[in-house]
Amino acid sequence: MQQAHIEAEPLTIPQADNVVEHALARGPVSRFMEKHFLHFNAATLVEAARAYEDLIERGGKMLVALAGAMSTAELGKSLAEMIRQNKVHIISCTGANLEEDVMNLVAHSHYKRIPNWRDLTPEQEHELLTHHYNRVTDTCIPEEEAFRRLQYHLERVWRRAQQEGKRYFPHEYLYQLILSGELEQYYEIDPQDSWMVAAAEKNLPIVVPGWEDSTTGNIFASYVLRGELRADIVKSGIEYMTWLADWYVANCQPPGIGFFQIGGGIAGDFPICVVPMLHQDLGYTNIPLWSYFCQISDSTTSYGSYSGAVPNEKITWGKLGVETPKFIIESDATIVAPLIFAWVLGW
């Protein structure tokens, strides 16, 4: 990596005149938000959306971190369009979000919704297991049509890489499957609603920390344990981090890179650390901090939760600056994220 000398440029929230100008071209969702989202978490949502939009309009870039089960929540219905319109420039996600968007793409009609999920008894949960349904809150993912269908095709690209002596990141194997067209025979939703299809078509940068924790990561580990595949054909988390450091240095020129975090955990913790690593561990100078920060969170700060820490705490870790626009929206990400994306898209 080359040492960069780049001055940070603080992001400014649009003033009233700009807000009125944008409002003239806005769709019904955004107009509803402008009229009704005036206080508390709702007001913060609109402020965060305006600042996101401002950064992008001034030529900045945005990292989106996906935790939780956002792909099973079908966030692709809005995130895919954000990717297509260059409103997202890099994604950090859990292995579950990476694979579950593709699973929904190829097995949607086999998913089972459980409206009364809060009332299930242990015996009813076990019955779902015996029928090969894995529950995520109110939605059950079908094992055979989702996990095993994807496994069949992933095994083929894993084995091909091993035979050819090649190594790829976890998301690159899925990109290969999507771009080959071999999964199209199974498509059960409009591929326009798949954020992984949109990402593959743009070759969007993705980092997937802790991929081993996912279903496909577990499946891959089983092949390694049986001696059928070598572990090193899948690039590691350290390689993701070093790749991300190079990417940040190459893309952090003013107005900089923003950080939009959905949920908590490793999807956010991993990429946000790249800046203090560049400063403190590599000794790079004049590398800008993140230019914007927003997190949608339901975590409780007082319990010592890093995921629930207020943004100002990140100043002490060398991730954000005093002047960085910072927002935390304490609400349900399945509600908030699509609304912010709708604002940025002008819907």
Image (tube, helix red, strand yellow):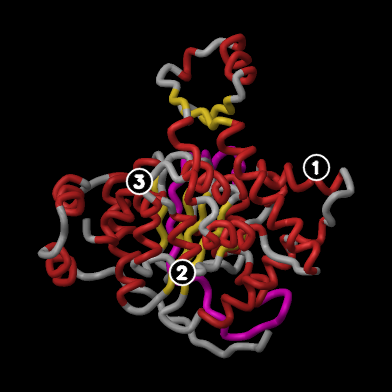
C-alpha span from label 2 to label 3:
25 Å
- Foreground mark, 3 or 1, reads 1
Q: Which residue is drawn at 73% across and 56% down?
A: 158
Please say whether residue 321 is visible from this viewpoint: no
Question: In this figure, which residue is indicated by the disc labeled 1?
Answer: 222
C-alpha span from label 1 to label 2:
31 Å
Q: Are marks 1 and 2 in contact (CB under 8 Å)?
A: no
Image check: 199 left or right of 228?
left
Q: Residue at x 57, y 76 (%)?
A: 248
Please say whether residue 244 is visible from this viewpoint: yes
Q: Residue 336 carries which label?
A: 3
Q: What residue type is labelled 1?
A: Ser
Question: In this figure, which residue is indicated by the disc labeled 2?
Answer: 202
Secondary structure state at the residue bearing disc 1: helix
Q: Residue at x 84, y 49 (%)?
A: 224
First in residue order: circle 2 vs circle 3: 2
Residue 43 in percent (x, y) is at: 27, 50
Other residues around mark 2 within 10 Å, as few (<14) / some (14–19) / many (≥20): few
Image check: 271 left or right of 42?
right
Secondary structure state at the residue bearing disc 3: helix
Q: Which of 102 and 135 is in front in this view?
A: 102
Q: What residue type is labelled 3?
A: Val
